[in-house]
């Protein structure tokens, strides 16, 4: 061997190690087939969104709105006919290609033939009944026009199915490449048409239509060559592919999934056809382009659902893990996109023209919000396809489509195209709430990484409830809109602050939820009680309808203050109150036998100083709202110090007192007075809330816990009723609004009085052990029951119906191995 020259095997080993190191540097998610497929499809959607935005911007700017509306109507009909026939085979492809083995090529060709043939048959029926579809589709009455339209429907069917085939073969990375070529060709043809066509009319409509779908012929030939020449043979050679599927199994699944897909397609594509037949061409243009932007958000969750079905077919044992991962990643991606779409919908639509921003802003926001519950439904359907539960697939899609179509028929004449958005949002929200319990069971089949998904599933109904209440039953606009709010409103395309004032209650309700989650967790509430309390708070906030911006901001400020205090500024474990002995798991028990539900904080001195400075700034800023804000913070600070739940609270109390004095002596700083919401109803609500909270607290005490933090925060707004002595009006509804979060928590203890699972510095429900290992007595003559097992999610070991569950032993209780 010559020096300096490696043998062939050594060179290959070195290159293999280099490739391995490079691959390990890639994001971990890219090594997971579930996420790799989903991310590739999402990238395809994102690239299509960017190029499609340019495509439709050129279309809307260059051509007349009536001609664009006609082209959009043709595209809607084409997509409906292709989808009704081809989309019904999508679930079958994703579910069974992983298991067809050597018969994969024949299976794909059979589906192609069935989808294309049914698409042609549907086109013939559509063309023969054109007179029943309105004047919009009259341009298809000729033989040549009908032939071209039918050919394009067949091409779109193949393009739809080939993407599914690539996904099922775990080669979804090719989908964005193919569609990038497709989009560039579309854009090039459109630019050329804009330069060459000077007149309007049907020629423009046909050009826009053919530019959209025509390049699909070349793309379909290229992609399917790769599929049948390379991917299918490689898939058939892989070991472990089952070839024992019967035609009966595939046929039964295909029939059921096809029926279910018809219902979804009637909603996704039938509703646009209904709109096109009932509104003017201009309004149809506004609706058609806006609904396509919203559909791109929904496609993000659909891509994850398809990948979930494929991986469930490849390995059903990992379905629970994949389901949890899909939930986490989907909401992590689509939630900020939905927020941006809601906030800046007018700016996005302004790219199409002023008419779009004027008439379609509310529709855009409703469709964007509907993407959140739609994500839950789509992931649930993906899991159902992997499990081959066809009856549930049909039921879910039929319910969603029936409510959307029925709601559109009712609301479209009343509210125009915005009524369609209301119908879609309402139907998907109701269906998502219905499938959440089943989704949780599927995702909870394995305990690993389960707590985050459980929390998301518990809190998703809270978010959906807030959206549904404020969108479907809007409250009166709040008063006191300031210059900053008006500036933000103008950036969002709203005229003045009046429209922004209608969104303030919903924005505050959603913004309060993270702070609520932190407070409820830190006071040791059962996760189920925390979610229930959040739902009660959302309903109470909607019912009370705080009438001013100042009160809404004061509520948010109060919750943020409480979240920081309970998270980092409670007494430390090594600094127990006098007369209390440390417990084995941290915390202390009073001589009465009660254990604090909240864990001790362990913030470092530097962090504690920084957080204290932040809280002081928040207290001083509260002086600019209304005296009720600093007065509530002062009462909360003094109360927590009195019950020894706040360490180093002196500076906070001084800052709150200073803010209160400034607010009382300089009324010009106030954002405005608090409108009076009446007396009878708030007083009745306050009495009912007090009774429910006292009852829930008594159940909590009988369980063996003292909730001093929640009690103090509940009572903190009450001293503000003395502010009228200083000439400041404080409506009872304002006091009740500030106390609502903690009244909701104590009320939730009526159903779930236990505590969360053990954490550093705190104890779980039922783990009331003395230092010698014996159970300590609770208040009264009852002895707390010991629970040695806790749910892996961190929920109470006792179900709401009183039956104990068996699970892993708790370390540190002296009962390991029992």
Image (cartoon, rainbow, N blue to C red):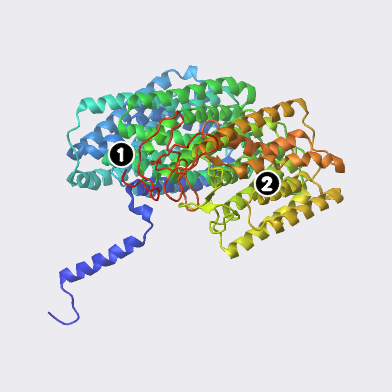
- Residue extending farthest to the bottom is 3
Q: Is residue 623 left or right of residue 270?
A: right
Q: Is residue 496 left or right of residue 395?
A: right
Q: Quadrant of the C terminus?
A: top left
Q: In which image quadrant can residue 127 be found?
A: top left
Tag 1 residue: 312
Q: Which mark is residue 558?
A: 2
Q: In which image quadrant can residue 492 be found?
A: top right
The answer, for residue 189, to whether it is visible in the render is no
Q: What element does badge 1 sit on?
A: helix
Q: Does 498 sit above or below residue 171? A: above
| Label 2 Cα neighbours within 10 Å, binned few <14 / some 14-19 / many ≥20 | many
Question: Can you give x and y, in whole percent of width and height, for residue 301 in the image?
Answer: 44, 40
Q: Is residue 62 left or right of residue 734?
A: left
| Label 1 Cα neighbours within 10 Å, binned few <14 / some 14-19 / many ≥20 | many
Q: Is residue 492 left or right of residue 767?
A: right
Give the alpha-carbon distance from disc 2 to disc 1, as whole Å: 46 Å
Determine whether label 2 and label 1 are within 8 Å by CB: no
Q: Does 629 sit above or below residue 675? A: below
Question: Can you give x and y, in whole percent of width and height, for residue 202 in the image?
Answer: 53, 32
Closer to the camera in the image, 601 or 333: 601
The answer, for residue 642, to whether it is visible in the render is yes
Question: Can you give x and y, in whole percent of width and height, for residue 711 in the image?
Answer: 64, 41
- Residue extending farthest to the left is 1
Q: Residue at x 48, y 31 (%)?
A: 432
Q: What element does badge 2 sit on?
A: helix
Q: Does 140 sit above or below residue 528? A: above
Mark 2 vs 1, N-terminal side:
1
Question: Can you give x and y, in whole percent of width and height, for residue 296 in the image?
Answer: 48, 40
């Amino acid at each position: 061997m010559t020096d300096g020259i490696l043998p062939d095997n050594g060179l290959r080993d070195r290159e293999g190690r280099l490739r391995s190191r490079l691959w390990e540097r890639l994001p971990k998610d890219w090594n997971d087939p579930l996420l790799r497929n989903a991310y590739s499809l999402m990238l395809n959607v994102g690239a299509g969104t960017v190029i499609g935005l340019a495509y439709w911007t050129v279309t809307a700017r260059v051509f007349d709105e009536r001609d664009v509306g006609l082209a959009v109507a043709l595209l809607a009909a084409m997509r409906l006919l292709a989808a009704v026939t081809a989309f019904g085979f999508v679930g079958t492809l994703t579910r069974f290609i992983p298991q067809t083995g050597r018969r994969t090529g024949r299976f794909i060709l059979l589906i192609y033939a069935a989808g294309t043939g049914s698409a042609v048959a549907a086109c013939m029926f559509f063309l023969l009944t054109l007179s029943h579809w309105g004047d919009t589709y009259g341009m298809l009455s000729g033989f040549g026009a009908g032939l071209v339209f039918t050919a394009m429907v067949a091409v779109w069917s193949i393009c739809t199915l080939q993407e599914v085939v690539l996904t099922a073969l775990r080669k979804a990375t090719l989908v964005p490449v193919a569609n990038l070529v497709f989009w560039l060709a579309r854009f090039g043809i459109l630019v050329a048409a804009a330069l060459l066509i000077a007149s309007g009319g049907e020629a423009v409509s046909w050009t826009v239509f053919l530019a959209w779908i025509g390049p699909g012929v070349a793309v379909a030939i290229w992609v399917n060559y790769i599929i049948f020449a390379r991917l299918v043979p490689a898939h058939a050679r892989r070991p472990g592919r089952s070839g024992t599927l019967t035609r009966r199994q595939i046929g039964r699944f295909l029939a059921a999934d096809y029926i279910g897909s018809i219902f979804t397609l009637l909603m996704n594509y039938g509703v646009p056809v209904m709109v096109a037949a009932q509104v003017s061409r201009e309004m149809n243009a506004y609706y058609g382009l806006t609904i396509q932007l919203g559909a791109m958000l929904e496609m993000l969750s659909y891509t994850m659902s398809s990948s979930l079905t494929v991986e469930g077919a490849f390995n059903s044992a990992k379905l629970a893990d994949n389901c949890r991962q899909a939930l986490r990643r989907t909401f992590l991606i689509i939630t900020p996109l939905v927020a941006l779409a809601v906030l800046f919908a007018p700016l996005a639509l302004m790219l199409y023209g002023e008419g779009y921003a004027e008439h379609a802003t509310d529709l855009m926001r409703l469709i964007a919000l509907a993407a959140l519950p739609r994500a839950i439904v789509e992931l649930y359907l993906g899991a159902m396809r992997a499990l081959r539960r066809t009856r549930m697939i049909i039921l879910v899609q039929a319910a969603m489509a029936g409510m959307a179509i029925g709601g559109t028929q009712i609301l479209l004449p009343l509210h125009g195209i915005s009524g369609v958005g209301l119908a879609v949002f309402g139907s998907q929200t109701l269906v998502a709430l219905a499938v959440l319990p089943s989704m949780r069971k599927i995702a909870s089949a394995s305990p690993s990484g389960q707590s985050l998904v459980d929390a998301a599933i518990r809190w998703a109904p809270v978010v959906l409830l807030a959206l549904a209440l404020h969108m479907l039953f809007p409250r009166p606009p709040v008063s006191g809109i300031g210059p900053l709010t008006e500036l933000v409103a103008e950036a969002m395309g709203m005229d003045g602050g009046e429209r922004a004032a209608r969104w303030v209650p919903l924005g505050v309700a959603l913004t309060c939820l993270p702070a609520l989650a932190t407070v409820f967790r830190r006071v040791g509430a059962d996760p189920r009680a925390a979610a229930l309390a959040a739902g009660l708070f959302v309903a109470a906030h909607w019912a009370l309808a705080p009438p001013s911006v100042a009160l809404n901001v004061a509520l948010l400020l109060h919750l943020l203050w409480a979240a920081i205090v309970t998270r980092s500024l409670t007494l430390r474990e090594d600094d127990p109150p006098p007369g209390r002995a440390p417990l084995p798991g941290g915390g202390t028990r009073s001589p009465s036998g009660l254990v604090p539900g909240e864990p001790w904080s362990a913030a470092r001195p530097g962090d504690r100083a920084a957080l204290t400075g932040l809280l002081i700034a928040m207290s001083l800023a509260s002086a600019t709202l209304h005296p009720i804000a600093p007065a509530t913070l002062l009462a909360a600070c003094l109360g927590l110090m009195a019950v020894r739940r706040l360490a180093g609270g002196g500076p906070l109390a001084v800052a709150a007192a200073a803010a209160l004095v400034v607010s009382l002596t300089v009324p010009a700083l106030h954002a405005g007075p608090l409108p009076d919401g009446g007396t009878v109803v708030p007083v009745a609500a306050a009495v009912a809330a007090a009774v429910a909270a006292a009852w829930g607290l008594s159940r909590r005490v009988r369980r063996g816990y003292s909730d001093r933090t929640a009690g103090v925060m509940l009572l903190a707004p009450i001293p503000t009723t003395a502010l009228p002595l200083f000439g400041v009006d404080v409506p009872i509804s304002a006091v009740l609004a500030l106390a609502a979060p903690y009244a909701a928590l104590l009320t939730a203890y009526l159903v779930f009085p236990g505590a969360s699972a053990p954490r550093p510095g705190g104890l779980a429900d039922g783990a009331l052990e003395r230092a010698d290992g014996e159970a300590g007595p609770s208040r009264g003559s009852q002895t707390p029951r010991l629970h040695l097992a806790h749910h892996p999610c961190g929920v109470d070991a006792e179900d709401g119906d009183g039956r104990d569950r068996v699970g892993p032993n708790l370390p540190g209780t002296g009962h390991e191995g029992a």
